[in-house]
Image (cartoon, helix red, strand yellow):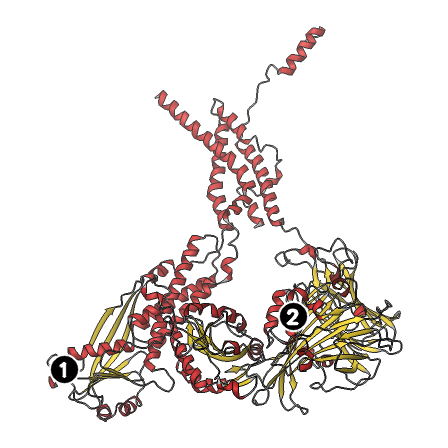
Amino acid sequence: MLTNAGRGPLGAGCLGFSASGVGRAPVSVSSASVGPPVTPEVVRGKRAALFFAAVAIVLGLPLWWKTTETYRASLPYSEISELNALQLRLRVPVTVVFTRESVPLDDQEKLPFTVVREREIPLKYKMKIKCRFQKAYRRAFDHEEEALSSGNVQEAEAMLTVPQEQAEGSLTMYVISERSSLLPQDTMSYIGPKRTAVVRGIMHREAFNIIGRRIIQVAQAMSLTEDVLAAALADHLPEDKWSSDKRRPLKSSLGYEITFSLLNPDPKSHSVHWDIEGAVRQYVQPFLNALSAAGNFSVDSQILYYAMLGVNPRFDPTSSSYYLDTHSLPHVINPVESRLGSSAASLYPVLNFLLYVPELAHSPLYIQDKDGAPVATNAFHSPRWGGIMVYNVDSKAYNASELPVRVEVDMVRVMEVFLAQLRLLFGIAQPQVPPKCLLSGPKSEGLMTWELDRLLWARSVENLATATTTLTSLAQLLGKISNIVIKDDVASEVYSAVAAVQKAAEELASGHLASAFVASQEAVMSSERAFFDPSLLHLLYFPDDQKFAIYIPLFLPMAVPILLSLVKIFLETRKSWKNLEKTD
Amino acid sequence: MPAVHGGERRWEAEAAPGMAAARPLALLVLLVLGPGGWGFADPPRDSLREELVITPLPSGDVAATFQFRTRWDSELQREGVSHYRLFPKALGQLISKYSLRELHLSFTQGFWRTRYWGPPFLQAPSDTDHYFLRYAVLPREVVCTENLTPWKKLLPCSSKAGLSVLLKADRLFHTSYHSQAVHIRPVCRNAHCTSISWELRQTLSVVFDAFITGQGKKDWSLFRMFSRTLTEPCPLASESRVYVDITSYNQDNETLEVNPLPTTTYQDVILGTRKTYAVYDLHDTAIINNSRNLNLQLKWKKPPENEAPPVPFLHAQRYVSGYGLQKGELSTLLYNTHPYRAFPVLLLDTVPWYLRLYVHTLTITSKGKENKPSYIHYQPAQDRLQPHLLEMLIQLPANSVTKVSIQFERALLKWTEYTPDPNHGFYVSPSVLSALVPSMVAAKPVDWEESPLFNSLFPVSDGSNYFVRLYTEPLLVNLPTPDFSMPYNVICLTCTVVAVCYGSFYNLLTRTFRIEEPSTGGLAKRLANLIRRARGVPPL
């Protein structure tokens, strides 16, 4: 900074002159030019003044500008603005397998062929999202025929899925004979726990069209529907009927922390024991293992004593029990939350599941729904935060022994509720099953494979939307505030985020769900790293007007003589031109 | 420049040095990192003990020391699921994530005046190797309510039941000394030490200024000190006790009276002297049920005589001397007041890198003679990376003052490295003294699980010594501070100089020089001619 001052026009070597005539400079110029005879001396003075002005403007100003400007690496602004108009094509590869006698024989001879059905998903979002079911028709192989001719759908399933593992996001539909006994009589289709489904065929002239419609219905239920995407994009959509009740799922993140807390506000009366180790091992861990493609999970638990709810429950004398109203539930969480403690080990979002054993004075305690009826599970959940379950101590226990009463928590009952809440919080909602469709029972992990795929679709789209929004607002911010430093590493993060967004979009379009999800996560990470880079703030509080203010002692004395002499020269030239015209 | 004690310079007390109570603010972190993982896990059991020791100090003040000890018979798994009951989750996660071996964190406001109050109940982390140790002190940190609240949240009973109901922030910070700490360490689960348990000890010591709060009387009660009384034990604690030091120094039981009368007393050798404590067990239903609360009171029948208190065998003092802003000297005075026994002291000093120590000037003198330390470990500082570390084992002769002094030069910092108010000065962390101090009365080694918690704070190595760790005052050192507006001044000045030069240069180059005909004269000449004419002299 200090050397900049010396680089002003003709600054070097000037110290040899005495500093006497600062103020007089313009005066003497004017006095010189007023004189009538145009001597060579006057012309030389004029040229010198012009030369000064030229050097100051051509050399000095750019030099000063260059040496005092903030460093801003170039950013792909145009590509970022193109991202906003990105078209997302979500390709769902569907393999349709026809068994013998499922469709008329003439139709079977036309196989194999591919049908693409594209549909735009109507969302009020700047990105156009198109869903593309690419159906590849083929005939069943011998082992598939054999499997599908068995009498039981579970048996057939076991025989079918063992040989080959299907890629993430893809679906396989088996079309069986109209009279097959694989499915119960009145059901038209069946959705399996993995990525397979069975559809009943038809002997008809329009067989392909009718079956095609059934297949699309089932495929939509198993992969992408509007509400899944609307829930995923809830943050980015305008407030309307979609977003209000869809804000339940957690935001996409690399990992999640799940904390189970047992709240015992009255340890004098209750000595509560829970076998959380066993319950986590048996119920939670298998579910999380199945979900592990969506992120890292860590589970821990704690017991908190003297942790009270924030509201006083209402006493109902008829049933001699206490009630929590629906409208008071939001106030329950805050006082408890200060006790839960933050995680010291990671920065991932935390999901809290609280098991509240009410104090003796407020037992039994029930949660009421909007109509005033007690909620069957006695639990509620808060979107993006977690769930609370009230666990009442059996009133018979008080008679038997004196205080404190030993309470053994029934973990099956508790974990049923918590796992259901966990599914809701992750946005794994019940699918919209088409009519006459049989849904297979849940797997032992509590999560079907296609449900995980659906989650990955939704998360990929959400990640892309988040990354695009982050990049757009970063570009806007940098465009608006001109003295933010953009370092090279920030720029490279922006470039890699843009590249990752493009890659994820391509992978989605070609139906590679797993790699698309990974790329979308990278896009989010890079864009957030760029957006929250601390170097962006370094010079933010050093505005431009201060820069000008500091250099005023240089600019003012320098600019005034130059401007005055330029004005003088201009006036004189005009006068001499007029004189010339007159003499002409 | 006079010796500057960190303790005696506060922002507002600068005008009256020495008048304000010594009150340095210290934050101390002691971390031991290393590979974790021990053996295999048994079904984890945990237990909680809580204890309050009230000690009337020789100066008339009252010290109260709370201890909450959670012992967890579990190894903290480094990965996977972790389940917590009494042990706080936040600290447990810290241990398993960073494979902590030991952690000691304390927040202290005020300075324990060993000379007047006697040796403190300070935690003594035994058998730690300094090579694996991370030790840091932040002497400038202010301790306030927002540090107490998270500390209280770590307690299983929060502040709802048991001894923790007494922890009311506005009283605890209205004291001359406040120190809260968290100590985590592994302890042996059994006598053979085949497996390891984790011990979390939360301690809080306060010293109430009895004269100020008690209107000149030295009597005290729980309510007067904490504005609360004890109502119920913490149902989670296996032990919940209050100990009151009722040792009478002149073999006469008539001097003081505790109310209610204790059911039991406890006698032991504490810090080298024989002490008697009245014991109140909150789990004993008789103590609380009588009046639904327990308000301990102590009355002095005869006011305690104002004679000089017994001087502890070991105490220390530290100061900076020298003048000017270039050089200075750090001096530490170590007092051994024992009449006939010499004992060794381990002195640990960490000095920031911007005080460049001249190690060749290190001198240690006792009784006018040079004292050669039997062990010196010195690790030089690296600029902006690590401070100086100086560790010495010094033998203190009986009844002597040992002076350890070392000269230093003040370094210049980069202008962005100065704190927002650099003229306040820079703090130098206190030195740490670890010593086996000879005790007056022989003591037996105690079983830690059985004896009161405060007894295990200063392990007795053999009958005649006890271990103590003292901290000296933090120091405040002035560093040369630059004029921070200088860059702008330089820019402005240079601009002005350049503009002045430019002006004359411009003038010379663009001006047209003409020879001017001498004119007929100005007003002065005419006036002069007028006068000359009047005088009859020819005009100019």
Q: Amino acid at mark 1?
A: Lys
Quarter of the image with the C terminus of chain B in it? top right
Residue that carries the numbered disc 2 in the rendered image: B167
Per the model, the C-alpha gap separating discs 2 and 1 is 84 Å
Horizontal and vertical percent for residue A160? 28, 89
Q: Chain of mark 1?
A: A
SS for dot 2: loop
Residue that carries the numbered disc 1 in the rendered image: A110
Residue A435 placement, left or right of A77:
left
Q: Are marks 2 and 1 in contact (CB under 8 Å)?
A: no
Horizontal and vertical percent for residue B37? 58, 85
* Residue A525, above or below A24: below
Residue situated in front as seen by the camera: A347 or B490: A347
Instruction: Please identify the quarter of the rendering in which residue B539 is found.
Output: top right
For the residue carrying disc 1, how many other residues have a C-alpha within 10 Å: few (<14), some (14-19), or many (20+)?
few
Same subunit, tags 2 and 1:
no
SS for dot 1: loop
